[in-house]
Amino acid sequence: MSAVIAVLGLGEAGSLIARDLAGAGATVRGYDPAVSAPSGITDTGGEAEAADGADLVLSVNSSKAAVGALQAGLRGMRPGAAWADLNTASPGVKAELAEIGRARGIDVTDIAMMAPVPGKGLKVPMLASGDRAGEVAERLGAFGARVEVLDGPAGLAATRKLLRSVFYKGMSTSIVEALEAARAAGYEDWLREHIADELTKLDSETVDRVVTGTRQHAVRRGAEMEAAAQMLTELGVPPLMADASRAVHERLAAEDER
């Protein structure tokens, strides 16, 4: 399948996606203000130049650069072309991008990459929502991409990704903080083994038990996390996650009192 695809942002993720698209037969035009395009990618001098003549533009910059990249790229887009934003931005930003594109007659698709790109490249699992999501998914799928289409507006894919991030990144940083404290206390090996053992016990009922228990025992657990945060401070470890846990437990306890 022949296609001209522009990739804006040639960092770790963008360069790998651009490379795989080119390897699968697409004509790829790239732009990044910080680096030159890799071999096989046509290097351009700006977003509008990269978008000029492209059937599809992939914005793989950053959430802070997403709006500016679209506004600049629109100047080079032809009627009928589509824009896909792959940045990890809030649903509100994705909706704003869709409105900006709609005002200029350009459809904007929200794409969320659901795993790290290194090691997977274009085959990284993706979710797509918004205008022409199905068509964009089909275009990328022709080059080997794995895109699941969601029935909803731009922002829905971002919502799914970020909801998972609250859970997964929150759990990950809690583990990192706990192990840092355990290292300072001289019990890192013990805690590491304990964490691994608890993770292997997870089953489909774990979520219900966690939610029910957290609210039911919020007062006691809030006091426990206050003590834990104090211990981390004594160990010289900033209790960021421990203190956040204390605050959540206290909020739940206050809600139940009302």
Image (cartoon, rainbow, N blue to C red):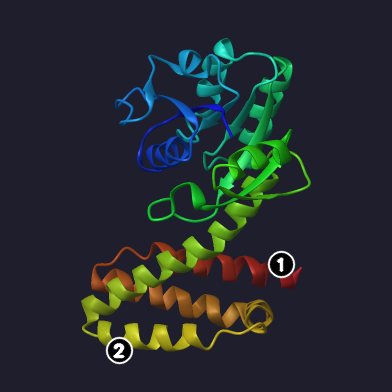
Residue that numbered label 1 is attached to: 255
* Element type at mark 1: helix
Count the marks: how many? 2
Please provide percent x and percent y for residue 141. Answer: 61, 45
Note whether 201 is above or below 233 in the view shown. below
Q: Distance between the Cα atoms at labels 1 and 2?
A: 36 Å
Going by the numbered disc 1, the residue's amino acid type is Glu
Front: mark 1 or 2 = 2
Which numbered marker is on residue 190? 2
- Quarter of the picture containing the N terminus is top right
Q: Which sits in the foreground, 31 or 197?
A: 31
Going by the numbered disc 2, the residue's amino acid type is Trp
Please provide percent x and percent y for residue 106. Answer: 69, 21
Residue 96 position by quadrant: top right
Q: Residues within 10 Å of mark 2 (few under 14, many from 20)?
A: few
Q: Residues within 10 Å of mark 1 (few under 14, many from 20)?
A: few
Residue at point 33% right, 82% down? Answer: 192
Q: Which sits in the foreground, 253 or 168?
A: 168
Q: Earlier in the sequence, mark 1 or mark 2?
A: 2
Tell whether 180 sits left or right of 196. Answer: left
Tell whether 99 sits left or right of 85. Answer: right
Please provide percent x and percent y for residue 11. Answer: 36, 37
* Element type at mark 2: helix
Residue at point 37% right, 66% down? Answer: 239
Note whether 28 is above or below 116 in the view shown. above
Residue at point 55% right, 15% down? Answer: 53
- Quarter of the picture containing the C terminus is bottom right
Please provide percent x and percent y for residue 52. Answer: 53, 14
Q: Are marks 1 and 2 in contact (CB under 8 Å)?
A: no
